[in-house]
Amino acid sequence: MALSTERLGLYNPEKPMQNRLTDLGPRHFWQYFPPIIQNNYGKWKSHEILEPGILVHVSETGDKVFTVRCGGCRFMSVEHIREMCEIADKYCDGYLRFTTRNNIEFMTDSQDKMEALKKDLQNRKHVTGSYKFPIGGTGAGITNIVHTQGFLHCHTPATDASSMVKAVLDDLFDYFQGMTLPAQVRISMACCLNMCGAVHCSDIALLGYHRKPPVIDHEVIDSLCEIPLVIAACPTGAISPAKTEEGKKTVKIKDERCMFCGNCYTMCMAVPLADKEGDGVTILAGGKISNRISPPEFSKVVVPWLPNEFPRYPDVCAHVKRIVEAYAADAKKYERIGDWAKRIGWERFFEKCDLPFTEHLIDDYRLQYDTYRTSTQFKYTEAAWEVSRAAGGIE
Amino acid sequence: MAFEPAQEQKILKYEELRIYSDEELNNYTEEELKNFKIKHEIPDVDELEKGPWPSFVADTKREALHRRKLAKDRMMIEADVAEDLLGQLQVSFDDGETHWKHGGIVGVFGYGGGVIGRYSDLQEQFPSIAHFHTMRVNQTMSKFYDTDYLRCLCDLWEYRGSGLMNMHGSTGDIIFLGTFTEQLEPVFYELGHVLQQDLGGSGSNLRSPSCCLGKARCEYACIDTQDMCYELTNYYQDELHRPAFPYKFKFKFDGCPNGCVASIARSDMSYIGTWRDNIRIDQEAVQAYIGGEIPPNGGAHAGKDWGKFDIENEVINRCPTQCMWMEDGKLMIDDKECTRCMHCIDTMPAALRPGTDTGCSILFGAKAPILEGAQMSVLTIPFVKCEHPYDNIKEIVEKVWDWWMEEGKNRERLGELIQRYGIPKFLEVLEIPAMPQMVTEPRSNPYIFWKSEDVPGGFERDINVYRAKHKR
């Protein structure tokens, strides 16, 4: 049975339940493993990165599989996928896979085929010059930036995603194609606090952020939203019931309590908070999810806000690059950004990355106490002398 | 070793299923693409074609040209959908705000999950993306595909949708981006009947579970991540498609503590492969690392000269438990002190391997910040055996869901419920005892919630008995 070309296909809207198939689940994985993977399932012994983006895995059976990893946009057209299929048919017996970080992996069982594949991939470029399948993203480098939808498909973003990721990765391209860092650096991007991509444990996280409390659409809020739900949605209790001059039910917002999380907007379309001047980007750093050496860590806010400079975000790119370069110059082998910051102390991190420290970086939410320093073990930096001067302690 | 699918799998052959002919698929030249301009002026969006990283704009334009040259009756939604999408993106850059409307309840009959409604708020200007609904297609485990399958998806989505997708969404699904309401049921019908493929989860459901690469191509995998993920996905189809939960719920399966699918940061129930016997050591390979014949860390640091590999400095001294040492030229490990952080194994993969008595640790409650702040999952069950069909694990799942469905508030993730009630309550639900491994340190406040049954005589007392001894 071929795919249908009828307007409604095989579906009959008069009888929606006729021949209905549900709950089939995903297709089974085994048939999508290339033979080399099937034959060596669970028998892998070791691996090596032959050059950036190229891996070889060795099995107990003596088999080897070569993998070529390519960066890719998460957002892609069927034309792009068809081109991947053409490549996979030509070199990989018709199989390919995607990684958790949205890279594309082509696998083959011979070194010769791998070399030919590599050449082919390097030569494929879009007509305007960008690579279609840049090879890299392995080892002590930067791999693909996982991200969310932004202006391409989302209704709550505080910034765009695909454009920011494109801009940042253009800037960090050498780190994608190289392995010159002390350890891997995982950069992630989410367009608002909802963090559909869960970026809160990344070495560097880029986060779209609103800075103005919601505007209230008094005219429709009562008819479109459950007002008690809107009130309950606020984690800080900033929203309370109110009435308009005409006596319609609505809500009011205590501005100084709003932390701009947008949870009320998720519950109710009549309280939007997006705003061209208010919205921007927050940068977090020092998180990770691996248990290697040190336990997983949350990322910490290191730049409270940068403007949304569409389409290429020069300020965001410069800040990310500055953090990566300071880390590359100073950290020890195997040390992740967060481990490095801990070792040298966060006060030194701000100095080495040349980032200003402002009151916005000191936690003032419920759990703030966990972040206080209750020790005299600190380092002197210019920021410390400034406080001593301001307090009249030194000239 | 092979695996049995939950149901017999149709063999999909693109040649038999395809919609478009080769002529239709190759209907434009490189030259035409160079000269192609979409119907809207998009100066800022065009800027995103520069630079080495793959340009999603260049790719979208390719799709736009391809659609423009297909015959009108060979697509069920408008041909210029990709052009309108880029046009609206330019307006969003100009305005600094998104132009997608809030909400929109659409779906396929009988499912509460898998489809997300999306409408443009600039419908007059961009009519072809007036509706731009998402469909989530449940990915295959670890995102391995063959080209027959992918080409079928491409034809289906070009014909009935925008031809634009995400490979993949953050949770794991293949994402079909953008179609009109009328085509939702037909896409679902074709997926199920022709491609034997279901939608994934969205809304207050179990979300499509996802797993790392596992035994397919990784020497560290301690569990069959693919098999576990597939089995639990299929077993819990009802929970995946029909909302019955307070909010979303995510299962993710990591084969080892390196955590390549980040289950510890983003799943309500994280399964992380581990072992309980000893790290396997190949002493000859240890010597090969020391001698410099094998590059450390699988060659991950080859881009910079870090000097000669130094096992003392790079492995032994960095071990967080200091449970390794050299003795008579041999690497020794005191395995009972090891916390399986993976560093030594990652650094010398050819010399060291996880043990062979394997299973997984189960952790609960990770989530992104909304509402109560970001949480990582808490280590709760140190080790469980993982054997198909995972009945021991299903039992745990159901205890957790029963409690969360009973006590969870609207939009309260499991991690927040655990915080609201405290871990001791959660242990009662799971019917397991407490252990020091659940905390990084014991409590420093002494405000212990003793219960009546903890104290001899209970809480019931008579004030008269007290007053007989103590004057008012």
Image: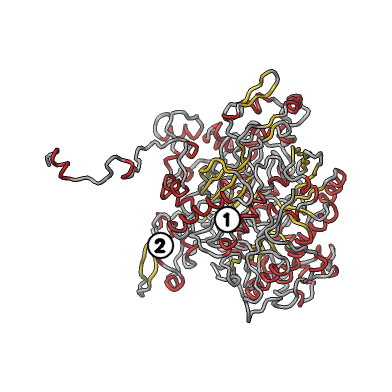
Give residue A196's mark. Answer: 1
Q: Is residue B347 above or below residue B142?
A: above
Instruction: In the displayed orientation, state which residue is furthest to the top.
Output: B328
Residue B101, how many percent across, how many down?
Answer: 56, 68
Residue A293, how many percent across, how many down?
Answer: 60, 34
B402 left or right of B188 in image: left
- Amino acid at circle 2: Ile
**Residue B170 visible within the image:** no
A394 left or right of B235 in image: left
Q: Residue at x 43, y 36 (%)?
A: B442
Observer-nearest of B462 and B150: B462
Observer-nearest of B243 and B91: B243
Element type where label 1 sits in the image: loop
Q: Residue at x 13, y 40 (%)?
A: B468
Q: Quadrant of residue B6?
A: bottom right
**Residue A303 visible within the image:** yes
* Same chain check for tags 2 and 1: yes
Element type where label 2 sits in the image: helix
Q: Is residue A11 above or below residue B321?
A: below
Instruction: In the displayed orientation, state which residue is furthest to the bottom.
Output: A14
A243 left or right of A98 in image: left
- Amino acid at circle 1: Cys
Coloration of the structure image: secondary structure
Residue B160, how many percent across, how many down?
Answer: 71, 71
In the picture, which quadrant includes the C terminus of chain A?
Answer: top left
Chain of the residue under the numbered disc 2 shown in the image: A
Residue A33, how many percent across, how many down?
Answer: 76, 52
